Amino acid sequence: MPEPTDGELIAASQTMPARFGEIFERHQAAVYRYLDRRIGAHHADDLVAETFVQAFQRRASYDSARLEALPWLLGIATNLLRRHWRDERRQLRAYARTGRDPVAEPMEEAVERADAQRVAPALAAALASLSKGQRDVLLLHVYADLTDAEIADALALSPGTVRSRLSRARAHVREQISDIGQ
Amino acid sequence: VDELEQLRRFRAGDDAGPDEARADRARAVLHRAIADAGARAGTARRGRTTTRARALAAAVTAALGVGAALLIFGSGDRNDGGDAAQLSALFSAGGDASYEPAASPAELASMLQDYPDLKGQLVARGTVAGFADGRTYVYPDDPPATPTVVMQISVDEVLLGDLPSESDGSVYVEFDSTSGSGDGLAQAFEESIPKGTETVVYLAPVDGDGPYPGTKIENDGAGHPPGQPLFRIFSPQGLYLADPGTGDVIQPGESTVFAGASLDELEPSARAFPPSEFDADISINEASPQGDAKQPN
């Protein structure tokens, strides 16, 4: 018997709420990784839980024809990040200024690749100077591997807006790191 | 290496995801939310008692919500045992339904009859005649609005109490919805509980002010004919439905199946419940009695 799709699980959870637990098991790691990379583990802990609780509460509005729920979940997570937007920008600026990622776990920092360390402050500066909308689109693309269409779905934007923001964000980052040896 | 590849490496760490302790904390928060929704829908099971200090009226009107009913009479998409076990654990962890479990139908009837400051209690046997979208409540401690669905039961026999003098021969039983939207609820409910399903119900009248003190009522009058009183199920133990496909009796509020039982055994005269089992995902299986349904009066 094939595994139910996310859409089928969420539809079933309308009448059998515990089925929503399977959505958590499928996607919590991906949601956590996205949030952790954006805001750090401390805030990610709370936001992962809040993302799934909000998703559970909103499940009646989920279109079960959408087979894959991860873009929807990441959209909720991204909306929750709004309250941490200034925190995120402050962290990125600190990273750019000091070369040390304020949200990195000690072990993670130790295993960072040398090339990443070299370019990371410039990347942090570039991300910090993006608008919130551009940063959301860019990081959903690179951290969560969402397509343009999935990002549009997640953030309730038109695909054209997503493409435009992504293009501008990439150009901005490219320009910011152009002085760093590749 | 272009800017996208650089960004993919940025803060990539070992990409291991959350450790188990972190996942457990988030999982627990979600499970509490799920369990709370289930408890609100009246799916808490026997053996757990009041943990939330609602008004006394809450016990009388412990809402057996649409969610609970659909849980039992659901889409036919049955879970396997693993899911059922998970569901059981969830609701055990989160139950806060405000009701005192009765040890027998007779005790349940006694509790209903003797409940303080309550008049117009009723135990009736009849058949499900249909569903309608009902009023909308805004509870003082639980906004936003909660839509309701009204189940019409054509009464065949009054087992305890009296039908109100203004009764048209049916009782109109109101259920909360936990879905947050009233659109299509009655239809969904009707598809899950076929017309003509035989039932025994233990009922308390709905006060004109709603189930809880301070409740704001919107679209008053929806879901039932003018002048007909509304009732609610008295505790999650107060609704029994005969499954024509299996010959079992189902008690949705506690996710309980009385295998091979007759509704006679759930009437107020019964001194013990029939043998039962918990099943988180039971449903009416087949042999819908549609067509045999009594028409609403």
Image (spheres, coloured by chain):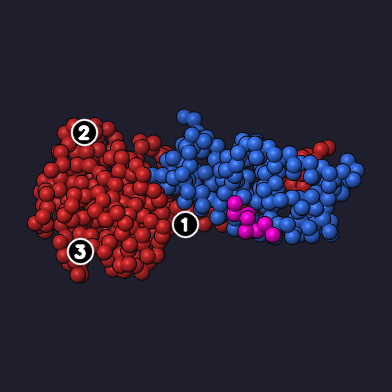
Chain colours: A blue, B red
Write the residue at 57% across / 45% down: A73
Q: Work out whether residue A57 can be spotted.
A: yes
The majority secondary structure of the magenta stretch comes to helix
Residue range (magenta): A79-86
Name the kind of residue labelled 2 in the image: Gln
Which badge, 2 or 1, is on the more N-terminal residue?
1
Give B18 or A104, whichever is nearer the viewer. A104
Does mark 3 fall on the same chain as mark 1?
A: yes
Name the kind of residue labelled 3 in the image: Met
Q: Which residue is mark 2?
A: B290
Residue A32 falls left or right of residue B128: right
Q: Which residue is mark 1?
A: B32
Residue B231 picture location, percent across and down: 21, 56
Q: Which residue is mark 3?
A: B111
Label pair 2/1, CB-CB below 8 angstroms: no
Q: Classify mark 3: residues with Cα within 10 Å, few (<14), some (14-19) or many (20+).
A: some
